[in-house]
Amino acid sequence: MQFNGKLVLRFLAGLICVSILAGCVSSTQTAPDSSGPSEVRFYLYLNRDQYIMTNWAEPPQFAIWLENDLTGEIRTAWVTQDTGTDTWEGRVGCPVALPYWVSRYGIEQGDGIGPTHRNPVPDAITGPTPMQAHDCAVRIEGGEQWSYYVEVNVSGDFNEAFPQYFGFQEDRFGNGQPSIVYRGEIDFSAEVVTEAKLIGRTEQEWFVSELNSDLSGISSARNLITRIQVAL
């Protein structure tokens, strides 16, 4: 059998063109959409040497969440189980554990009510309190500006400004220094994340939905978290 050299060359050239076109289509289909959902991953590192010095030596309660600077949307990334399920060993409740996040979660859910034992946060965003390190992620729409928050509190870290006894009255929740809140910013369009800064505290003995910027009485509570890392 005789082969036509020109036909063979044309056939091979056609195969090469098909392969090139197929490669281009595949590349286009798998290219990421920068305007689509983006994942934010948080890494939180707790200071065990600090919290074991408290009266009960238990790891702190904490919550991590995002707030959209333009729309006001709130997205909880993670919260420790006691607060997220309102289940407390040896007591009915502890409204001073993470009160600021509880108030924000009420806005997030649209009912103004924080988590309860009958209506806890979803299992996907809560779990047992980690001993030292924790990471979690949340997906949001990209190309937007958000603020991220971390609230942390450990029971029994009393000091001179937040004592265990007030005359004949005792701190009824065993709170000590109240929860403190850190805040940072995320700009997805510029892929910039700012460092988390301590911006305020709540109150020792009662539930509040606003932060107190007076941090003069906060001492060891500043050392509960050694590092907050945010990755896009």
Image: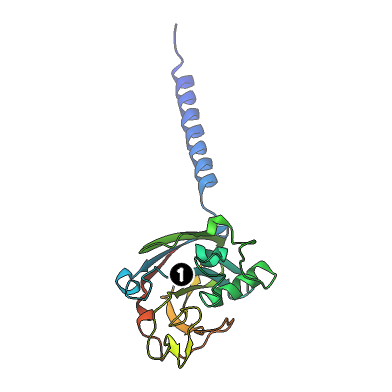
Q: Is residue 142 visible?
A: no
Q: Is residue 192 left or right of residue 226?
A: right
User: Where 211 falls versus 139 (above or below)?
Assistant: below
For mark 1, what is the residue?
61
| Near-viewer residue (226 or 191) | 226
Q: Is residue 20 visible?
A: yes
User: Where 113 falls versus 30 (above or below)?
Assistant: below
The single residue placed furthest to the top in the displayed view is 1
Residue 76 x/y as whole percent: 55, 66
Q: How many marks?
A: 1
User: Where 3 falls versus 87 (above or below)?
Assistant: above
**Which image quadrant for residue 102?**
bottom right
| Near-viewer residue (204 or 43) | 204
- Going by the numbered disc 1, the residue's amino acid type is Gln
Q: Residue at x 49, y 20 (%)?
A: 7
Q: Residue at x 38, y 72 (%)?
A: 56
Q: Residues within 10 Å of mark 1 (few under 14, many from 20)?
A: many
**Which image quadrant for residue 41?**
bottom left
| Near-viewer residue (160 or 216) | 160
The quadrant in which the C terminus is found is: bottom left
Residue 208 x/y as whole percent: 58, 82
| Near-viewer residue (20 or 128) | 128
Residue 110 x/y as whole percent: 69, 69
The quadrant in which the N terminus is found is: top left
